[in-house]
Image: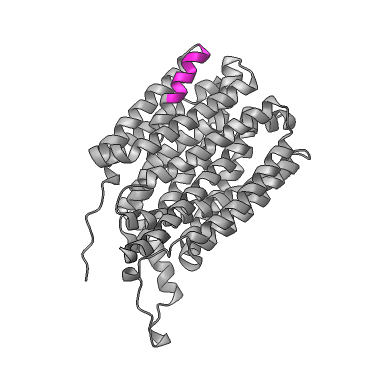
Amino acid sequence: MAAATVVGAPVRAATRGVYTAFTLMGFASASWAARIPQVRDELGLSPSRLGLVLLAIAAGSIVSLVLAGQIVAHFGSRRTVAAMAGLLGIALSGTAIGYQFGVLPVVIALFFAGFANGGWDVAMNVQGTVVERHLGKAIMPRFHAGYSVGTVAGALIGAGAVALHLSVTVHLMISAILVAIIVMLAVQAFLPDEPEDLEPPVPTDPAHAAPPASRVAGALATWREPRTVLIGLFVLAFAFTEGAGLDWISIAMIDGYGVPATVGTLAFATFLAAMTIGRWFGPGWLDRFGRVPVVRALAGVSLVGLALFVFGQAPAVAFIGVLLWGLGASLGFPVGMSAAADDPAHAAPRVSVVATIGYCAFLGGPPLVGFLGDHVTVLKGLLAVAALLAVAIALADAVKPLSAPPRA
């Protein structure tokens, strides 16, 4: 019993650390998203120009994600998350101040915020799969539920800040500092990224060490694995569905339904609360019904919600649509991350590839919806999400669990 307690305590501590990393990343993201309408108004941006500004986050994320597999493999998930949390704090503070001086400072700050998000995302998902293996049960969706809890908290606090006329600068600066400090402390409990029985033996002769070129070639080979690429496209479809809600629900409610800014932010919070519910109860659904049936059913629920939101004609119906949209979008990303990490020996490069492909949705999504918004309104432009949900349904077979790899 004593040995079990010694082994269990670090895993429990690491579990709390991973929850903290997910939750505060969500809090930081929602704190920014809740103030997008005010930043848009201050800068006088049209929907298409706002979409291009938001593109900076995705561009930074893509650059980071391309490098994230090697960064995490070299530095480990603990140091990577700590460094990226510090960078995000700086970038969010830069956004808080920069929007008062024009578009360019905001774009630069958002690029580095996206860079921090990308590396942080891969590293905490890698650590999440490590904890999941130690626990021996599906828990990844609940880590992502932690992210959603953070987004709900960030959105509600953002709505309160808007109602109290708290400046964007004060709100985001306080959020940035708190997130950076708390995460840097929490990740100290992270476990080693690979179990001891999967770590390669230390060569006694330096000549036997794998050359850097072979390690790079191995990372590039991951991009040629059909299953990994298909999981990435599946995650891309759900990431577009989630990202469109995060970026545009508030603005679509304000412009499309004529509601006050506070109500628009509450609709955004409703979307996030629905995602939290789906991710919290998701592990039970996945264990009972399996990955593929669950994600296909939820994609259908999201389609229904999207239709109600776009064609509801009344704010109350739109809120019901937002609820279903968020619930349906809840499990796609975490299930994709778990599927990418089914083989623990190759978890880091595969999670990096899947996340990189998935984040392309954030690269193309904001300008696409913004472009459509200039021509058919942002509310109608969100119908583009339906096409991506159809792709998710078609590719759901890719996330079937791998059978256990043979052991030497």
Name, please, the residue furthest toward the top: 313
Q: Is residue 141 above or below residue 86?
A: above
Q: Could you tell me which residue is drawn at 44 percent across and 68 percent down?
A: 216
Quadrant position of residue 281: top left
Please state the horizontal and vertical placement of residue 304, each as a whole percent of the image.
38, 22
Task: Locate residue 347: give its quadrant.
Answer: bottom left
Q: Residue at x 70, y 44 (%)?
A: 173
Callout count: 0
Q: Which SS type dominates the magenta stretch?
A: helix
Answer whether residue 104 is visible to the viewer in this image: no
Q: Which residues are magenta?
A: 314-323
Furthest-front residue in view?
A: 2
Residue 122 lies, in percent from the top left, at 47, 54
* Drawn side of residue 45 relative to residue 196, left or right: right
Q: Does any portion of residue 139 appear in the rendered image?
A: yes
Extreme residue in the right direction: 101
- Model colouring: one colour
234 in relation to 345, above or below? above
Q: Residue visible at 41% across and 23% down?
A: 305
Q: Nearer the viewer, residue 225 or 355?
A: 355
- Queried whether the magenta region covers residue 191, the answer comes back as no
Q: Position of residue 408 (x, y in %)?
A: 21, 71
Residue at x-position 40% and y-position 86%: 207
Image x and y of residue 358, in percent: 44, 45
Magenta stretch holds residue 320: yes
The quarter in which the N terminus is drawn is bottom left
